[in-house]
Amino acid sequence: MFRKTIVYSSLFVMLLCSTSCFEILEEINLNADGSGSMLVTLNMSKSKTKVASIMLLDSINGYKIPTEDDMNEAMKDVVSHLEKTDGISNIKKTKDMDNYVFTIACDFKKVEHINAIFKDLIEKQNRNGGTSFTTENFTFNGNTGTFLRNFKYDSSIKKSFARLNDEDKKIFDDASYTCIYRFKDAVKSVSNENAKIAPNKKAVMLRVDAMSFITGAKNVQNKIQLTR
């Protein structure tokens, strides 16, 4: 558990210190039977010049700068965790240190298996931090064709942001979280007013800027109804 904490701490430090924009991309390709694939991308390419300069330092703003070896170890830990998760297979990772783009991909047998990836970390956060983040982030009902991306906003997000100094807060000005879900069946409707259905009706995209996410003005909660 300690090593997994280091994984996310190292990446968070890198985000705080890049003082520019970054994007987290969550992609799911869902089959009709509930199996599919997932790809998560951390893209700091728009900040690559600044990040490259920061990588030469030992620390900044009181944060220790993760080395490339630290990042390699972090990626290994993520893969190791995925390998131990039931229903997860075909795990792949990529690391582009020229553009600072990192990806983790895997296949899953059922949508519920994705929840197990972060369940332990979320439950520990809820216990230690007194938060109430959901551990059931994804559900799919094949009979009704209903895909749910669950999210419960917790005020601790805003409180944690408020504790950062003004310089560190700037990193989130141009940051965003984007969800892209692709389906075999056509999409009939979405519940999130910020979600967009692709022209071919087979995909949904939802982009939330970091500040709206932090304040609770927008979130990634979405009920996607497929045609049946």
Image (cartoon, rainbow, N blue to C red):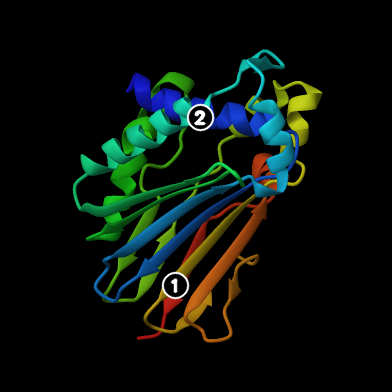
Query: Which of 201 and 221 lies nearest the eye of the viewer?
Result: 201
Query: Which secondary structure lies at badge 2?
Result: helix
Residue drawn at (66%, 19%), measured in percent from left and top? 57
Q: Which of marks 1 and 2 is nearer the N terminus?
A: 2
Residue, disc 2:
68
State the quadrant of the C terminus.
bottom left
Query: Which of 200 and 70 lies nearest the eye of the viewer?
Result: 70
Provide residue 59's location: percent of width, then percent of height: 65, 15
Quote the CA–CA distance across marks 1 and 2: 33 Å
Residue, disc 1:
182
Provide residue 168's location: percent of width, then percent of height: 74, 27
Residue drawn at (51%, 29%), measured in percent from left and top? 68
Query: Which of 180 and 106 lies nearest the eye of the viewer?
Result: 106
Compared to residue 89, the image places residue 81 above or below, namely above
Query: Which secondary structure lies at badge 1?
Result: strand
Provide residue 83's location: percent of width, then percent of height: 23, 42
Compared to residue 135, the image places residue 36 above or below, namely below
Compared to residue 128, the image places residue 202 above or below, namely below
Answer yes or no: is residue 156 visible: no
Query: Which of 153 and 2 lies nearest the eye of the viewer?
Result: 2
Looking at the image, do the residues carrying marks 1 and 2 touch, with CB atoms under 8 Å apart? no
